[in-house]
Image (cartoon, rainbow, N blue to C red):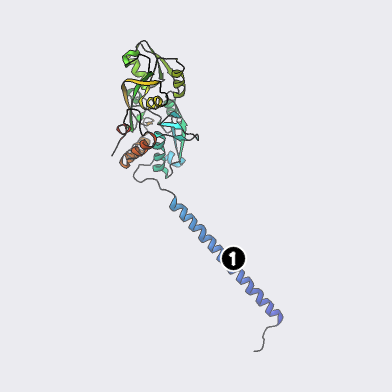
Amino acid sequence: MRNLMGKSGMSKWMLMVSMAVMVFAAGCGNQAKETGEAATATSGNAAAAAPSADVPAPPAAVKERGKLVVGVKNDYPPLGYLDENGKNAGYEIGVVKKMAEYAFGDANAVEFVPVNATNRIPYLDSNKIDFIAATLGVTEERKQQLDFSTNFFDGGVVTVVKKDSGIQAIPDLAGKTVIVIKGSTGSTYLDEHVPTAKQIKIESNADAFRALKDGRADAMFHDAVLMSEFVKTSTDYTIIGDQVAFAPMALGVRKGEADMLNFVNGALEQMRKEDYFKTLIEEYLPQAGDLDPMQMIPRP
């Protein structure tokens, strides 16, 4: 066959073929890249959890913010404390994380704000937090200040003394010096039932335990769960008398915020249905002295 192309034509033809191959290869590469990116995005979206359809959404402003801001305790094991890595941990922390998971599909979509018995309600009133999850006992006085959620834990108050103190019951605290947490239900109980007890009102649990061990008081009158944990490691102390001042614990919401209260109560009810409180108790409070933790939580 006669060659119809000259050398120049052949060179141009080869150049055009080479360029076509390069363009085709680049196109395939881009298509593969785009397909891979799309697959990755699809996979990522599939892995991301969705908010729970079984729980009412939080208020619109909170939903837009993308996280909960919650007042919690940092010094109240096993309910709310900092673990060995400085991370928030405990029964109440687990409750709040589950609420964040319901709201945003992410248990870590929450900012924990440390509070104590004195400042937790002022923090709520000043909009520093969305709600309180900080060992908040339900009382008639507090009902005038905020709206309570449904109860998610029940606890009372006990008396801790040195084993050789001679104090046998709560009435024996009359005339004695007793450490209490400022603003606590224990302090209110002594005001009403043992008014001659000399109360040393301390804001933090750590300072209260330190004062007790330093011998600044004859007794400490405080939460049964916390004190049961204390006597396990401080074996020269013991719990005496009855558990009193029973106060169901709940979350505290600003008065009139119906959307927030609806979300909080819906989340707690879903946890009860899932028996999630039992899961948290088994993790953080397998036992507490003679107390039965399973009697302290809502069950299905």
Query: Where 197 sits versus 203, above or below?
Result: above
SS at mark 1 in the image: helix
Query: Where 273 sits versus 137, above or below?
Result: below
Q: Position of residue 251 (x, y in %)?
A: 37, 32
Amino acid type at circle 1 is: Ala
Q: Between 68 and 93, which is closer to the camera in this rendering?
A: 93
Specify few, some or many for label 1: CA neighbours under 10 Å numbering under 14, 14-19, or 20 or more: few
Residue visible at 36% across and 37% down? 282
Q: Is residue 26 left or right of residue 250?
A: right
Residue visible at 61% across and 69% down? 22
Q: Is residue 81 left or right of residue 158?
A: right
The residue beneath circle 1 is 26
Q: Residue furthest right?
A: 7
Q: Position of residue 139 (x, y in %)?
A: 33, 24
Q: Residue furthest bottom?
A: 1
Image quarter of the C terminus:
top left
Q: Based on the displayed image, in which of its 4 quarters is residue 79 positioned?
A: top left
Q: Between 258 and 149, which is closer to the camera in this rendering?
A: 149
Q: Is residue 267 left or right of residue 44?
A: left
